[in-house]
């Protein structure tokens, strides 16, 4: 555990940090996450923000369906949306997105775009 006063994380550690780490860290809410991302940026280190920051679950699902229709859906976007749904204990996944998942998981949809 680092000392509480006068310690800053080394740049190598910041480069390993992801928005996913921040989203799942204890006591790291949206504002703290934004502050850490901005602070790292001031040191020249980029921590990309999550794809779905500030969106409701219905907006997230709608956006994913649109991106899938355009052929631009990524695995990380799907993962983040499902994680957000689980964190909120939402039992509902829209049928349109279930169809997208079925296509991805079926053998006829093997080569969906990756970042």
Image: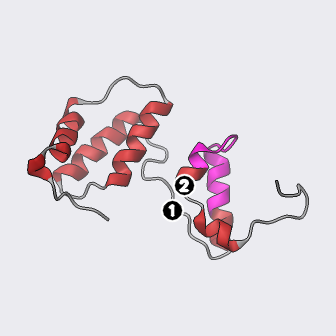
**Dot 2: element:** helix
Kindly identify the residue that appears in the image at 22 percent across and 34 percent down.
98
Q: Is the C terminus in the top left, top right, bottom left or bottom right quadrant?
A: bottom left
Residue 47 on the magenta span: no
Kindly identify the residue that appears in the image at 11 percent across and 48 percent down.
107
Q: Quadrant of residue 113?
A: bottom left
Q: Which residue is mark 1?
A: 48
Q: Residues within 10 Å of mark 1 (few under 14, many from 20)?
A: few
Q: Which mark is residue 19?
A: 2
Residue 34 on the magenta span: yes
Q: Which mark is residue 63?
A: none
Do residues under tags 2 and 1 come within 8 Å of each other at their CB atoms?
yes
Marks 2 and 1, the one that precedes in the sequence: 2
Please give the range of residues in magenta.
22-37
How many marks the image carries: the answer is: 2
Residue furthest out toward the left: 108
x and y, in percent, of residue 110 in the image: 15, 54
* Colouring used for the render: secondary structure
The relative height of residue 92 versus residue 44 in the rendered view (above or below) is above
**Dot 1: element:** loop
Q: Considering depth in this image, is 88 or 57 the residue closer to the camera? A: 88
Kindly identify the residue that appears in the image at 67 percent across and 56 percent down.
35
77 left or right, relative to 20:
left
x and y, in percent, of residue 34 in the image: 62, 54
């Amino acid at each position: 555990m680092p000392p509480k006063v006068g310690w800053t994380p080394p740049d190598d550690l910041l480069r390993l940090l992801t928005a996913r780490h921040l989203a799942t860290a204890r006591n790291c809410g949206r504002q703290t996450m934004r502050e850490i991302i901005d602070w790292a940026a001031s040191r020249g280190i980029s921590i990309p923000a999550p794809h779905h920051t500030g969106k409701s679950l219905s907006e997230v699902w709608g956006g994913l369906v649109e991106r899938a229709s355009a052929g631009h859906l990524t695995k990380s976007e799907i993962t983040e949306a499902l994680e957000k749904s689980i964190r909120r204990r939402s039992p509902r996944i829209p049928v349109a997105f279930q169809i997208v998942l079925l296509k991805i998981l079926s053998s006829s949809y093997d080569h969906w775009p990756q970042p």
